[in-house]
Image: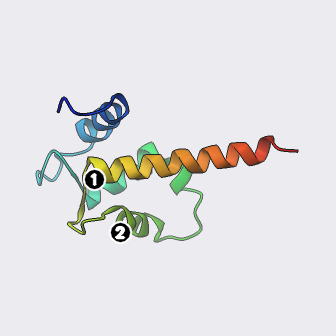
Amino acid sequence: MMSSLTGTEWCIESLVFQKYPGKELINNCTLSKTESLSFLNTELAAFTKHSEDPGVLDLTMKKLDLNSDGQLNLQECVNLIGSLAVACHDSFARSTHF
């Protein structure tokens, strides 16, 4: 673990990068497309399984992979989790207004 990680980043790294990478032995600091899709299907199933678009996971991977290297690094995963947190917050805020 790098000492420059915030507490939130460390939590994400420990969940994502200690549990999912290594199956394809490309790089244990990134997730391959297969590893990323496994992460999305398992850890974020509530968000992915309710989509009517069968290509939503591939599209999500393409949007997250900012450097187009076919893998997700920590920053790209933090972007995903941050976007989901904002969406959840917005949904909660809308549901509590009368």
- Quarter of the C terminus within the rendering: top right
Classify mark 1: residues with Cα within 10 Å, few (<14), some (14-19) or many (20+).
many
Mark 1, secondary structure of its residue: helix
Q: Which mark is residue 20?
A: none
Q: Position of residue 9 (x, y in %)?
A: 33, 36
Q: Position of residue 36 (x, y in %)?
A: 32, 54
Q: Residue at x 18, y 48 (%)?
A: 23
Classify mark 2: residues with Cα within 10 Å, few (<14), some (14-19) or many (20+).
some
Q: Position of residue 59 (x, y in %)?
A: 42, 70
Quadrant housing residue 72? bottom left
Q: Which mark is residue 35?
A: 1
Left or right: 38 in relation to 56? left
Which residue lies under the disc numbered 2?
A: 62
Indicate the colouring scheme: rainbow
Quadrant housing residue 49? bottom right
Left or right: 4 in relation to 90? left
